Amino acid sequence: MARKASRAHATEEGLFPQESAGEAGEGPIYQIPASWKDLLADEIRKPYFHHLAQFVAEERSKHEVFPPEGDVYNAPKLTPYKNVNVLLLGQDPYHDTGQAHGLCFSVRTGTRFPPSLVNIFKELHSDLGVPVPKTGNLTPWAQQGVLLLNAVLTVRAHEPNSHKGKGWEKFTDQIIEKVGEKPDPVVFVLWGGYAQKKEKLIDTTRHTIIKSAHPSPLSAHNGFFGSKPFSKINAALREAGKPEIDWSLS
């Protein structure tokens, strides 16, 4: 029987304190979780990030934007840098009401599963025999060291990719690169062509890359189903001497 990690209880992390304008800026977009503060402090002082902050603030003043401000950094907040053993990369937050809460592919408890998440759970059951969960909230995965990162961290309601190309990609590329700089091996999970373009940011001689088609209904039958990503992730963790992920959510 494979050894499974005990689920850590999430601890409330402090947030990057708002600094005065002219330094790191001010407002919710600058509130980076404390465990990532030193790694990303220089990045959020760059001009592009200031423009991104202005864009997101203006969007929120005129439109409904997901996820809520307090959830934008849930991925790094729930998975402190030192705990990251797996990075699963998504593209864009869910854009319908009540879905996005800052973790890629995850939805709030009680929310209907989007099609991609339905397919993820189908493959999880096929791969490891894990029963289809009753919740689509993937927080327990994040608490075990799976950084559930979207490349773009905000979206206008009901308008997919509406915040693409505004600066988030530069910021999350930095997160990917910083994870790649960890001295211990990390498993990077890249589903679909968009995510796989980020492979160039990763030292493949030190880290494990697990990739396949995207779980979207448009592509899941072209290589996602049958790819067994969950058992492959645990095998790579086991080889690295790290605890496996308990993928069950019930």
Image (spheres, helix red, strand yellow):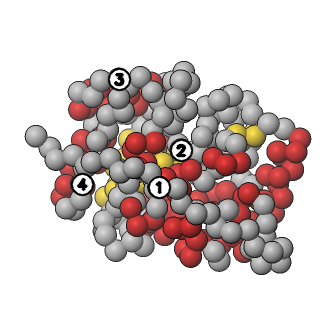
Asked whether, in this view, residue 22 is left or right of residue 225, the answer is right
Within the image, what quadrant is residue 45 found in? bottom right
Determine which residue is flagged by label 3: 132
Distance from disc 4 to disc 1, alpha carbons, whole Å, reads: 19 Å
Earlier-in-chain disc, 2 versus 3: 2
Give the number of the mark in front: 1 or 2: 1
Earlier-in-chain disc, 4 versus 1: 1
The local crowd at label 3, few if under 14, some if 14 to 19, many if 20 or more residues have their Cα within 10 Å, is some
* Front residue (pair 15, 186): 15
Distance from disc 1 to disc 3, alpha carbons, whole Å, reads: 27 Å
Asked whether, in this view, residue 147 is left or right of residue 233, the answer is right
Residue drawn 71% across and 48% down?
69
Determine which residue is flagged by label 2: 103
Q: Amino acid at mark 4?
A: Pro
Determine which residue is flagged by label 4: 243
Quadrant in which the N terminus appears: top left
Give x and y (percent) for residue 7: 32, 47
* Front residue (pair 206, 54): 54
Helix or strand or loop: what does disc 1 sit on? loop
- Give the number of the disc on residue 11: 1
Residue drawn 72% across and 58% down?
29
Earlier-in-chain disc, 1 versus 2: 1
Distance from disc 4 to disc 3, alpha carbons, whole Å, reads: 23 Å
Give x and y (percent) for residue 164: 70, 48
Distance from disc 2 to disc 3, alpha carbons, whole Å, reads: 19 Å
Residue drawn 83% across and 78% down?
22
Distance from disc 2 to disc 4, alpha carbons, whole Å, reads: 21 Å
100, above or below 173, in the image: above
Helix or strand or loop: what does disc 2 sit on? loop
Give x and y (percent) for residue 143: 41, 50
Q: Amino acid at mark 2?
A: Leu
